[in-house]
Image: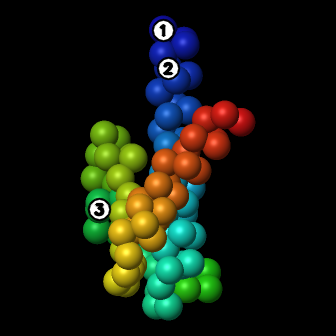
């Protein structure tokens, strides 16, 4: 029971951070191929706190339940070319893979 409790607590604490890093992978690749801002939304609640880092705006929405702690989205402007869009889509999973290997 202790192991399960430890797993649950660590998931609640670290999952939002891991989602942020995953979404940063998409956002950083999108910055390479767009000139406008890139938005990262974290959570699906009604909280509306934000911070800006260069052209990246991170919006913290909060969470409506513990089941939603892995919710994130990235929005960017138009990217021309299928290869560039694939690179942006792969940015998040690549960051997640690197973090899993660490």
**Comes first in the chain, label 3 or label 2:** 2
Residue 57 shows in the view:
no
Mark 2 is surrounded, within 10 Å at the Cα level, by few (under 14), some (14 to 19) or many (20 or more) other residues, namely few
Where, quadrant-wise, is the C terminus in this rendering?
top right
Residue 35 shows in the view:
yes
**Comes first in the chain, label 3 or label 1:** 1
The answer to which of 85 and 1 lies nearer the viewer is 85
The answer to which of 47 and 94 lies nearer the viewer is 94
Residue topped by disc 3: 45
Label 3 secondary element? loop
Q: Residue furthest top?
A: 1
Mark 3 is surrounded, within 10 Å at the Cα level, by few (under 14), some (14 to 19) or many (20 or more) other residues, namely few
The answer to which of 10 and 94 lies nearer the viewer is 94
Does residue 79 sit above or below 89 in this rendering?
A: below
Does residue 34 sit above or below 86 in this rendering?
A: below
Q: Quadrant of residue 72?
A: bottom left
Determine the residue positioned at 56% across, 32% down. 10
Residue topped by disc 1: 1
Label 2 secondary element? helix
Does residue 38 sit above or below 22 in this rendering?
A: below
Q: Residue furthest bottom?
A: 35
Q: Are marks 1 and 2 in contact (CB under 8 Å)?
A: yes
Residue topped by disc 2: 5
Can you tell which mark lies on residue 27? Answer: none
Q: For marks 3 and 2, give the CA distance.
A: 25 Å
């Amino acid at each position: 029971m202790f192991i399960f409790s430890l797993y649950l607590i660590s998931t609640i604490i670290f999952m939002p951070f891991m989602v942020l890093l995953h979404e940063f992978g998409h956002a950083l690749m999108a910055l390479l191929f767009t000139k406008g801002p890139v938005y990262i939304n974290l959570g699906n609640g009604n909280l509306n706190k934000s911070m800006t880092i260069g052209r990246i705006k991170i919006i913290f929405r909060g969470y409506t339940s513990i089941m939603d702690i892995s919710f994130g989205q990235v929005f960017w402007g138009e990217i021309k070319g299928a290869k560039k869009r694939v690179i942006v889509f792969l940015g998040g999973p690549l960051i997640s893979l690197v973090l899993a290997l660490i």
